[in-house]
Amino acid sequence: MKLNKAILALAISATLLTACSSTDEQDAGFTDGSQSGAAGINDASTSGLNGGSGISGSEMGSGSGFGSGGGLGPEFSDPNNPLSKQTIYFMLDSSQVQQDYVPVVAAHSQYLLANPGQHIVLEGHGDERGSREYNIALGEQRAKAVASMMKVQGVNESQLEIVSYGEEKPAAFGHDESSWQLNRRVELVYQGK
């Protein structure tokens, strides 16, 4: 019951954050796709993300942190537990967390609240399209979006670290939409106590 209330509060908070974002927190060019032409990004179709052939919350892979190998507890290896999902995927040119991933962010927020000694690195990534500088900035905006949702849930800022790798650490090495979908992500990497 507590988790349901937390998920509802997170969904409401995310909606409010999206509606009330300021230019200091989020550059509109990273969320509305208006930078596509200027950044040299190929506007491939993203309809596959929500149209059945894309990535859903239940198909997420694990990040490269403690949760994927052990050290955090059995809930991180239980595929039915949202804590086992340590990757948040994004749409093309977007840093907005999709509704499919709100429960995942909420679960990790609750875990961090219950374990104040834990520290997590939010690693932002982008696909290969666009300039290196653009992708570093977009990866950072994605990581900041996840961090903002966690802070709204009460997670202490000292438990969060933001890093952006841009296109430098791809999850998939292909040059097609299915590879690009896997590369537009934030990985949640636990650093331990």
Image (tube, helix red, strand yellow):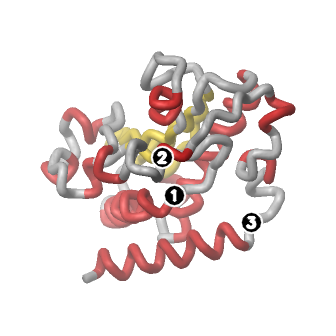
The residue that disc 2 covers is 49
Q: What residue type is labelled 2?
A: Leu
Image location of residue 57, percent across then percent down: 35, 53
Image location of residue 48, percent across then percent down: 48, 43
Q: What element carries label 3?
A: loop
Q: Which amino acid does label 3 sit on?
A: Ser
Q: What element carries label 1?
A: loop
**x 58%, y 36%: residue:** 163
Q: Can residue 42 be seen in this view?
A: yes
Q: Is residue 193 visible?
A: no
Q: Which amino acid does label 1 sit on?
A: Gln
Q: Are marks 1 and 2 in contact (CB under 8 Å)?
A: yes
Task: Kindly give the residue lying farthest to the right in the view shown.
Answer: 38
Instruction: Give the alpha-carbon distance from disc 1 to disc 3, as whole Å.
Output: 16 Å
Q: Residue 21, which numbered label?
A: 3
The local crowd at label 1, few if under 14, some if 14 to 19, many if 20 or more residues have their Cα within 10 Å, is some
Relative to 106, residue 2 above or below: below
Quadrant containing the C terminus is top left
The residue that disc 1 covers is 98
**x 34%, y 62%: residue:** 107
Instruction: Give the alpha-carbon distance from disc 3 to disc 2, as whole Å.
Output: 24 Å
Which dot, 3 or 2, sits closer to the camera?
Answer: 2
Dot 3 or dot 2: first in sequence order is 3
